[in-house]
Amino acid sequence: MTDIALLGDRTFLFEKLFMEIGASFQFLQPAILGSPFLPQYKMLLIPTGFANPDYSKALPTLQRSKSNIAGFVKKGGVLTVFGPMMSEHDYEWLPLRLKYVCELGTQNVAPSQHKCSCLICTLTPECDGYLMPGDGFETVLKDDKGRAVLVTAKFGEGLIVATSVHEFPAAEYIKWALSQAKSAKL
């Protein structure tokens, strides 16, 4: 079993982060998402820019894999997804409604007691936009205009964490998310 599936190309920055905390990981090219030959994972991590064709080829695969993603989370996996880097995005491939609007800038956020708020290491994170969560989502962090920048939702036995924070997730968050997750098939 592999702890983390990172959707996208290999990057040494993610490798360094995962190695520092002792998490096993696999980089998944978008085209193989949903393959029956993939192992089980605890977390699927989708980095910033997944919907922008200038940065990634992941969006068509995410759209085709909607039921696989829902099944993964429902069985206990943790899905962590960052901003799509498009002017707007509806996350139609998620099992719950979520909308994103791009607006780059440093934001001020108030501290939160929610465990997943450890995703960020600062109260002034760089954000690439804000989120408009639908039913089922809980807002964890808001920008200084009251807009969501980190949301979470229970779905089945798993968890969806979505953010517009434009920074690497903190090691503490990765450890926390893995401790919450169950291994599941993508």
Image (cartoon, rainbow, N blue to C red):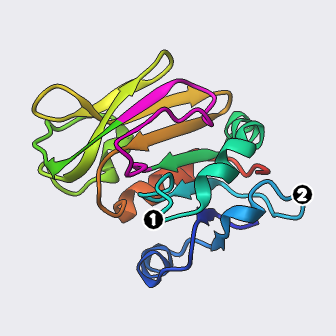
x and y, in percent, of residue 25 in the image: 62, 72
Circle 1 packing at 10 Å, graded few (<14), some (14-19), many (20+), is: few
Spatial CA distance of label 2 from label 1 is 28 Å
Image height of 87 relative to 38, above or below: above
Q: Nearer the viewer, mark 2 or mark 1?
A: 1
**Is residue 139 depicted above or below 70 in this figure?**
above
Residues in magenta, as a range: 82-100
Is 120 positioned to the left or the right of 69 in the image?
left
**5, above or below 91, in the image:** below
Residue underneath mark 2: 36
Viewer-proximal residue among 174 and 37: 37
Task: Name the amino acid, label 1.
Answer: Asp
Mark 2 belongs to which amino acid? Pro
Mark 1: secondary structure:
loop
Q: Residues within 10 Å of mark 2 (few under 14, many from 20)?
A: few
The residue that label 1 is drawn on is: 54
